[in-house]
Amino acid sequence: MTAEQIFASIYKREPSHVAFTPYRICPLGAHIDHQLGKITGFAINKGIFIAYGPKENGVVEVQSMQFNNRAQWHVEATPKVKQNDWADPLRGATIALHKRYPLRRGLCAVVKGQLPIGGLSSSAAVIITFLSALCEMNGIRLTSREMITISKEAENKYVGVSCGKLDQSCEIYCRKDQLLYMDMQDDSFELIPQNPNMKPYKIAILFSGLERSLAGEAFNMRVDECRSAAYALKAYAGLPYGKFEETQLRDIPREVFERYGDRLPESWRLRAMHWYGEMERVEQGVRAWRCGDIEEFGRLCFESGHSSIYRYQTGSAELKKLYEIMYETDGIYGGRFSGAGFKGCCVAFIDPDKSESIKERVTSEYSKAFPHLAEKFSIHICESADGVILNK
């Protein structure tokens, strides 16, 4: 059933509006946006739908089809601390929006995702979709930058996940068949059209079957390790430094890391190695994309995945195995696990002519390795798509 049909069955009326936000993938630029690095991204033609209607009493009532409980709060009395359920990002978004604009009208809504949860920025997509609905109900028109800022604030300050702006930026700025190339230091970005001489490709989303929630503590620890490395390098080099939470590796020239990096604790050194290497891969990948070299672009994606595993040291056993199977499968140009790497999926750029053989081999090999996940494992072939177009 669609979100509209479910809404009608619950509320015995048709929804007044339906909104959609695509999922995103980040081929290159993994784990570096929170340190003001450069990223690449695509939106894909699958995402989150919300069917909704007004509630004049200011109550927000949201039902997700991925979770059992229905969540409720009032736009002027949203709980100040998180409630530790799936709707916390939406509560955080309500608070962040209400800080900037008056809210009087609530909504009743049904949220439905097209793909399993995990690795495709589903939390950011849900927040953006919900915000677009809440703004529609209250006559608010956000700019792209406001939407990104409010969405990020909901995750950072309310949920407590130290994410950057990668997810939200991809879901807003991306356009079909164009690579988003963005610098998180100044929010400048370029949409690079697909080279007409590029070999055909599709985007495969490979779900591991893991359904655990984001390991927020482990994710935040990686962010702190990057900041710790930057803070220590500033001290070693005699550079001025201020607040820890405002310190990023982007502040540190590569030559400073090369000179003092061996003084860092091993985990901090590895995080920094990943950061500097990934920054280089973004630049190399952008050049390959401009030239229409999907094979080189894919090779760099595989290299990014390797660095994420062995330098950033994230990725579950299941996702690591899935990455290894992808690497050894004919017809996959390149890929890596998506998102924080503690659950969810891998993404891959594939030769469309070999999609069936890829599906067969990867499914067979993964099911042998993790038979208890065989029924939950799935592969979805997607294409790039437009991000959200605000204020149409």
Image (cartoon, rainbow, N blue to C red):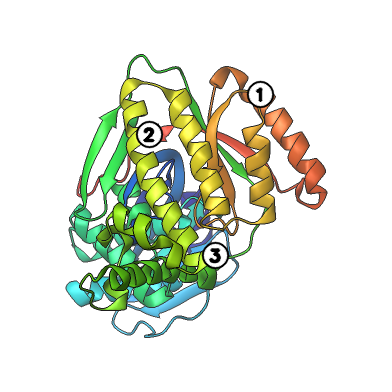
Q: Is residue 113 visible?
A: yes
Q: Residue at image x 41%, y 47%? A: 277
Relative vertical location of residue 107 with respect to residue 118 in this rendering, above or below: below
Q: From the image, tell me which residue sits under label 1.
A: 356
Helix, strand or loop at label 2? It is helix
CA distance separating discs 1 and 3: 31 Å
Which residue type does callout 1 highlight?
Glu
Crowding near pointer 1: few (<14 within 10 Å), some, many (20+)? few
Name the front one of labels 3 and 2: 2
Which residue type does callout 3 highlight?
Leu
Front-most of residues 390 and 193: 193
Which residue type does callout 2 highlight?
Gly
Q: From the image, tell me which residue sits under label 3.
A: 214
CA distance separating discs 2 and 1: 27 Å
Relative vertical location of residue 80 with respect to residue 383 in this rendering, above or below: below
Residue 259: x %, y % from top left: 35, 58
Q: Which mark is first along the chain, 3 or 1?
A: 3
Front-most of residues 278 and 375: 278
Asked whether the beta carbons under mark 3 and mark 2 sit within 8 Å of each other, the answer is no
